[in-house]
Image (cartoon, rainbow, N blue to C red):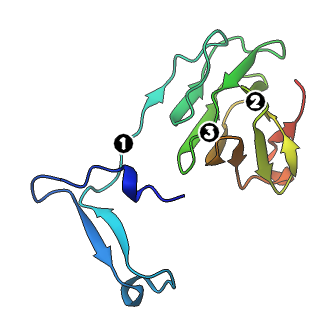
Amino acid sequence: MAFSDKITTSLFGRRLGLQNMSTVQTGGSYGAQDYLVGPADFRVGVTTAETTSANLKSHGNSALIASSVGSSQVYTLDPPVPGVSKTIYNSTNATAYVKTKNSEVILSTVGSTQTVIALPAAGVMITLTGLTTALWATNITTASGINLTNST
């Protein structure tokens, strides 16, 4: 998906800008490409106040830290935005369930039709990237301990 027709191209100052790189510089075969340059990193939103009564945003980082998350508590994740990543961390002592809002699919090596993430116990984290408005992608495997399923 091309975003170049949907951006503001006027950037002021010398600390942030677009750099046009040729295929010689990138090693790619797609021709010249623009890259945003300047900052050491990008700061995304972080929240530790997630609840089951409000959807998780489809961007930024969410830490599930409720003291009594149980199997009956299910978080809902808003639909993906293409090209945007979402990280979810479980710091509770119970499995946290996260389902996609409109049955958006989560693609991984575990499968390609799952709509629910089960994050077992404390310290487990998953990063999802929006491929389309109906598809999330992640690189988790069955060895990660994270379970992808279609039900809670």
The residue drawn where x is 63% and y is 14% is 66
**Which residue appears at 51% of the width and 22% of the height?**
48
Mark in front: 1 vs 2 = 1
For the residues labelled 1 and 2, the Cα–Cα distance comes to 27 Å
| Image side of residue 36 versus residue 51, left or right | left
Q: CA distance from mark 3 to mark 1?
A: 19 Å
Classify 10 Å Cα crowding around label 1: few (below 14), some (14-19), many (20 and above): few
Position of 77 compared to 148: left or right?
Answer: left
Q: Is residue 75 above or below residue 89?
A: above
Q: Which residue is at 57% across, 28% downward?
A: 63
Along the line of sight, the residue nearer the viewer: 4 or 137: 4
The quadrant in which the N terminus is found is bottom right
Amino acid under disc 2:
Ala
N-terminal label among 1 and 2: 1
The amino acid type, in three-letter code, at marker 1 is Arg
Camera-near label (3 vs 2) is 3
Q: Residue furthest front?
A: 5
* Badge 3 or badge 2: first in the primary sequence: 3
2 vs 5, left or right, is right
Residue 62: assigned label = none
Q: Secondary structure at mark 2?
A: loop
* Callout 3 amino acid: Pro
- Disc 3 from disc 2: Cα separation: 25 Å
Classify 12 as above or below 47. Answer: below
Which residue in the protein does label 1 denote? 43
The C terminus: image quadrant: top right
User: Could you tell me residue 141's position as x and y percent?
Assistant: 81, 54
Q: Earlier in the sequence, mark 3 or mark 1?
A: 1
Q: Residue 27: percent from the left, percent from the top?
A: 46, 86
Viewer-nearest residue: 81 or 125: 81
The residue to which callout 2 is attached is: 121
Q: Which residue is mark 3?
A: 80
